[in-house]
Image: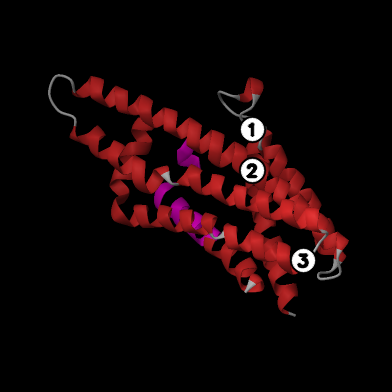
Amino acid sequence: MTAVLLIAVPIAFNVAFFELGRAFDYPNILRKEPDEILRRFAAGGSGLLLRWQALLLSALAMLPLAALLAVVLAAPPALTALSIVIGAAAALVQAFGLVRWPFAVPELARRYFAAEGPDAEATRRTIEVVFATLHRLFGVGVGEHLGYLLTGFWTLLVAVSILSTAVLPGWLGVVGLPIGVALLIGTLEFVGPNEKDGWPLAGTIVPIAYIGWSVWLIALGVFLLV
């Protein structure tokens, strides 16, 4: 079951990610103005909502994956417990960062385009502020910053667990170390002087790191099967 999840979860995540890119220009759309994002979102209809739901579920699937992998690797108890806690936290913050899209954003989009009368423009501006605040807090702050931080930390813990046992080849643990570090670098994208516009280097590293992370998880699953 652990091997199947290691293979299926990153595939499901990347399929949902690809579909959102095709239908919604994700993740580039995230850096656009609220008016453009809401208009593109409303035009996407129910199909776009289902794509966001699929990405949300793929993030939640990390919960059982983190727990089962820690048990299978059977590292020292403290390392196993920490890996489960951090892996579960990573899954939850990623999901919490995504949950606004299939539930909160549809309501904002409906109200945005239903605004009429002399107060319509003021209503839209208010909705844009609400959306931008949710976007920065749950998207940038929770989903990206905390998501990258905890996922990177979990990746390092799994890599160290592999190196401390004989369940999987040690080189898989070595490969996981730079991937975890790359994800941790992503946490700095909107920190300090980069808070407003982001750090371009981190923005470039993170997509590459997540591709490597996905391939690494699949490799873990394949080696567990064989």
The amino acid at mark 3 is Leu
Q: Which residue is mark 2?
A: 148
Asked if the residue under mark 1 is in contact with the one under mark 3, i.e. CB atoms within 8 Å, the reply is no
Position of residue 176 relative to residue 186, above or below, is below
The magenta stretch is: 13-30
Task: Give the Cα separation between the discs numbered 2 and 3.
Answer: 23 Å
Question: Which quadrant holds the N terminus?
Answer: bottom right
Residue 15 visible in the displayed image: yes
Chain-order first, disc 3 or disc 1 = 3
Q: Position of residue 99 (x, y in %)?
A: 43, 46
Chain-order first, disc 1 or disc 2 = 2
Asked if the residue under mark 2 is in contact with the one under mark 1, i.e. CB atoms within 8 Å, the reply is yes
At horizontal 55% and vertical 44% (from top left) the residue drawn is 93
Our reading of the magenta stretch's main secondary structure is helix
Position of residue 158 relative to residue 180, above or below, is below
Q: Is residue 19 within the magenta segment?
A: yes
At horizontal 62% and vertical 63% (from top left) the residue drawn is 65
In the displayed image of the protein, which residue is found farthest to the left?
117
Q: Position of residue 94 (x, y in %)?
A: 54, 47
Q: Position of residue 35 (x, y in %)?
A: 34, 31
Position of residue 93 relative to residue 188, above or below, is below
Q: Which residue is mark 1?
A: 189
Task: Give the Cα separation between the discs numbered 1 and 2.
Answer: 10 Å
Chain-order first, disc 2 or disc 3 = 3
